[in-house]
Amino acid sequence: MGVYPDIVVEAKNLVKSYNGIPAVKGINFVIRARECVGFLGPNGAGKSTTVKMIYCFLPITAGELYVLGLDARRHQRSIKSQVGVVAQEDNLDPELTVKENLLLYASYFDLPGRVAQQRAEELMNFIDLKDKASTPVEELSGGMKRRLAIARALLNNPKLLILDEPTTGLDPEARRLIWEKLCQLKERGVTLLLTTHYMEEAAYLCDRILIMDEGQILAEGSPGELVNKYIGKEVIELAPVQEAQAEKLVAALASKVLGYQLVGETLFLYSNNGRSIWQDISGRHRYLRHQILRPATLEDVFLKLTGRGLTK
Amino acid sequence: MRLEISHRTWKVFWRNFVVFRKTWLANIMFNFVEPLLYLGAMGLGLGAYVPSIEGLTYLQFIAPGIIASSAMWATASECTYDSFTRMHYQKIYHALVVTPISLEEIVLGELLFGTFKGVLYGTVILLVEAALGLILSPLSLLIPLVLALSCFTFAELSMIWTGLVPKIDTFSYYFTLIITPMFLFSGVFFPVQAMPSFARGLAFSSPLYHTVELVRPLALGQATSTAWLHILWLVGFSVLFFYPPIYLFKHRLLK
């Protein structure tokens, strides 16, 4: 039972199947108050399915799920009234203005008129859309729409804000602006849960990351912890490298290499002492077309855990 | 089966109404042109060759049926094309269902809004016909109430189709196979008694037939003893077809 007031979401052996085909295969996780947790994984990993169960959109196939201490199978209205949701696809009222969108949505949560007015003003300030108050939503840019969707999800002062791929399809500048707003929410103590397949987004925003693939959680930890635990400080990429050649190379560098991965003809060497390896290699293997020494990232973690990249 | 239905249904209705307020003038103008074309072409054009029906001129005969059928068309298009657009393209149902509003309330709110539009459009036609001197009785003030009941049945039928269809194009089947035949064979343009018995049976199973049978006497000020039967039929239909659209939308959206 979610008896600890500190625990916002708790899943035990959570399963979701669509017509007998499992999409989420018995996962366990906990989200604590004031945390920003990210589900990171490629399309079809089960991230969206998981968060849709949390915001009571999809029925649970098996297992247990508690949101704000409430059973997600039974107390859906109560959970929905305390959670904010930014869905993956825009679902604003396109014919209405920015302000009308906010006021209408506030009414769904039974906010009294004056409170709704006040919240709408505050939130339009927060998302920098004050001067667009009377602009119909269909005339807004993609980034503005997404910011409005975030403002709408904050009307009810949610204890948990869920964002399903909040920046997918946005240009880099609009994405930065969304990140900035989410960071401000974090500072205010809002518990955030987001899904993403952008590792830099997960690394930038999240205190803790759950890496998902094929309906399972493969690893869990802070971005730094995950990179340290699975990879090390640096990665060296070499290509083209054949399998036999790779084994020989790794054997020769055994003392300095923490692990390696051969994906196609690209060899990834993981190390805490990349510079030293780099010197060893660059003298002897000039024939390699592709040689890079770079800091390790979450993408490397994902690659190591699944044998493939986050984006296909 | 437990239905989650509360006052929140009206929030869904209100949402659609707020959007409708933005476009209502254009909407209403457009929609009452077509019924008037029918009145003109059939009532005056064809009517010139038709001897009186049940003691009425042809124009007087079809005028009440046009009220009922306009209401039907308005509800049917609201609860098919417009509802489907809200659900499928604008994802409005998704936005609503993550708030304390339930899916049952969304479907019922849509049914009520479709009903409202039918009543509104039917009433506009009623007013136009009254201005043209085609409405003979103050009993016609009761017509909007009849329309409210019958439009609810049209809304249910349409939402069943909306809950089923994969693509917006598929609505043409609904209009070709259900709405248009109802429009033509429910006693709007001629008494159904003139048709062969199997066709009369089909007419009897159409909510529009019962609506026309209620609206015409009200417009003409004729008392009928069978009114209660038609009301009962429409109430029964509403009750029977209340759950199927809810079931279909639950299975469509919340898998």
Image (tube, coloured by chain):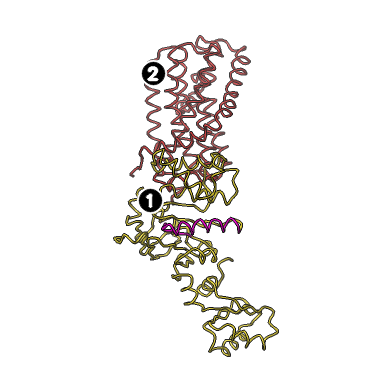
Chain colours: A yellow, B red
Camera sees residue A122: yes
Q: Which residues are the magenta region? A: A172-194
Which amino acid, by three-letter code, is at mark 2?
A: Thr
User: What secondary structure is found at the residue carrying circle 1?
Assistant: helix
Label the magenta part by its dominant secondary structure. Answer: helix
Which circle, 1 or 2, is nearer the viewer?
Answer: 1
Q: Which chain contains the residue that carries disc 2?
A: B
**Rendered position, A222 above or below B63:** below
Residue B29 on image: x %, y %? 58, 25
Q: How much space separates mark 1 and mark 2, taking CA atoms?
A: 53 Å
Judged left or right of residue B110, residue A312 is right
Q: Residue at x 58, y 65 (%)?
A: A311
Q: On the picture, is A109 further left or further right than A305?
A: left
Residue located 36% across and 40% down the image: B5
The residue under label 1 is: A82
Q: Is A180 inside the magenta-drawn segment?
A: yes
Task: Provide the residue designation for mark 2.
Answer: B226
Q: Seen in the image, is A42 located left or right of residue B103?
A: right
Q: Position of residue A34 (x, y in %)?
A: 40, 60
Q: Nearer the viewer, residue B241 or A185?
A: A185
Q: Amino acid at mark 1?
A: Gln
